């Protein structure tokens, strides 16, 4: 299969043109067509010669994603199911926030992290997405917005979809670079967030990469026993090692970390758990933020239920009394297979039943 032209950063595109006997400025022209004018076919690049367009068609596809399902929620959330050239499927979500339009992207087909409450891990990791397959998710959403004719643009990105982003580190970093390019979509680094379940070596590497992209950590439990029972990764990187990496990141960047915490009824949502979490973060509370997330029930994981509103508020109150910055996350798309991986799982069941 031919790679997507979205795989290439601008520097890599320049190198490719030079290697193929073209002038450097062709890369700038193509880059503008891709990300400013946002064409959907090489033939639309009207200031390129026929020979150059043939060269591009010979070596690349422009769009590696086929739109399978688009679900539009009552709150303006849009959920997309895309098919890749090898027929695997991935999900992408557009969320309308008060501060702009945020898109959540997928980075892997399946996931090996093994969180027992998560729909994303129902399919074990098949492969990493290429840089272009991640970029194409944003471009598909932007093309969708362009067709609406309201001059809306993607302003924020969260790398929190299916998969563990730091398990696909290099491709994700190239993706962020392309999104941040001042001659492309120009999405500010501080408007992008990458979430990890806690790959300690990659957290430390991310701390020194120079990008001011935000970091979020999927914590979900305040002690090793509880975290190991719901997140297999805690066996490899228990809380002591994870917090050591957090301290390293804070020292290197002086940037705030968000801790994601899914509220599971009777599992991690008691006032005692809240106090343990406050104690875990007390020496770094000036640069940490806790996001309490209402759980979206997954059919295949019926062991878990959403915490009650009363228990969630009690948990929140304990954190606030201990000086921990926290919020209960606003829900998006609750009427359209809200949990990450649900839409893909539903489609796979349909295909098997045929």
Image (cartoon, helix red, strand yellow):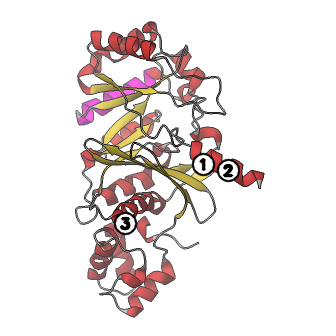
Residue 248 counted in the magenta span = yes
Q: Residue furthest bottom?
A: 50
Q: Are marks 2 and 1 in contact (CB under 8 Å)?
A: yes
Direction top: furthest residue: 272
Residue 265: x and y in percent read 54, 17
User: Quarter-wise, where is residue 287 in the image?
Assistant: top left
Q: Position of residue 57 (x, y in %)?
A: 48, 82
Query: Which residue position is annotated with label 2?
Result: 348
Q: Secondary structure at mark 1?
A: helix
Residue 147, which numbered label? 3
Residue 128 versus residue 160 in the image, above or below: below
Label 3 vs 1, first from the N-terminus? 3
Point out the residue furthest to the front here. Answer: 74
* Residue drawn at the location 44% of the way across and 34% of the way down: 200
The residue range painted magenta reads 240-253
- Cα separation between marks 2 and 1: 6 Å
Q: Could you say which is closer to the camera, residue 301 or residue 25?
A: 301
Q: Which is closer to the viewer, label 2 or label 3?
A: 3
Residue receiving disc 1: 344
Asked if residue 195 can be seen in this view, the reply is yes
Decide: is 97 above or below 115.
below
Earlier along the polypeptide chain: callout 2 or callout 3?
Answer: 3
**For the residue carrying disc 2, how many other residues have a C-alpha within 10 Å: few (<14), some (14-19), or many (20+)?**
few
Residue 333 at what x, y percent from top left?
46, 41
Quarter holding residue 230: top right
Task: Identify the residue at image location x=39%, y=11%.
Answer: 314
Is residue 260 one of those drawn in magenta? Answer: no
Q: Of discs 3 and 1, which sits in the foreground?
A: 3
């Amino acid at each position: 299969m031919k790679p997507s032209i979205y795989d290439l950063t601008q520097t890599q595109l320049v190198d490719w043109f030079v290697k193929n006997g073209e002038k450097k400025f062709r890369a700038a022209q193509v880059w503008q067509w891709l990300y400013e004018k946002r064409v959907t076919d090489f033939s639309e690049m009207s200031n390129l010669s026929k020979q150059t367009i043939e060269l591009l068609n010979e070596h690349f596809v422009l769009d590696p994603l086929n739109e399978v399902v688009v679900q539009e929620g009552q709150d303006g959330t849009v959920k997309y199911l895309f098919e890749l050239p090898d027929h695997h499927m991935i999900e992408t979500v557009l969320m309308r926030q008060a501060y702009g339009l945020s898109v959540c992207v997928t980075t892997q087909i399946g996931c090996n992290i093994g969180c027992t409450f998560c729909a994303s891990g129902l399919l074990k990791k098949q492969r990493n997405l290429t840089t272009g397959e991640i970029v194409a998710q944003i471009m598909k959403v932007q093309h969708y917005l362009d067709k609406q004719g309201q001059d809306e643009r993607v302003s924020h990105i969260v790398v929190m979809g299916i998969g563990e982003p730091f398990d696909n580190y290099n491709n994700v970093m190239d993706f962020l670079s392309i999104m941040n390019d001042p001659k492309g979509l120009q999405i500010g680094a501080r408007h992008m967030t990458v979430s990890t379940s806690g790959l300690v070596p990659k957290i430390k590497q991310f701390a020194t990469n120079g990008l001011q992209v935000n970091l979020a950590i999927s914590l979900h439990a305040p002690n090793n026993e509880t975290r190991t029972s719901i997140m297999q990764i805690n066996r490899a990187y228990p809380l002591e090692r994870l917090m050591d990496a957090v301290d390293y990141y804070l020292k290197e960047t002086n940037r705030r970390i968000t801790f994601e915490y899914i509220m599971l009824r009777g599992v991690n949502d008691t006032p005692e758990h809240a106090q343990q979490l406050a104690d875990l973060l007390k020496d770094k509370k000036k640069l940490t933020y806790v996001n309490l997330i209402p759980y979206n029930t997954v059919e295949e994981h019926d062991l878990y239920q959403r915490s009650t509103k009363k228990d969630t508020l009690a948990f929140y109150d304990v954190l606030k009394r201990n000086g921990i910055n926290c919020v209960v996350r606003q829900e998006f798309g609750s009427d359209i297979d809200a949990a990450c991986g649900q839409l893909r799982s539903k489609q796979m069941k349909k295909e098997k039943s045929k």
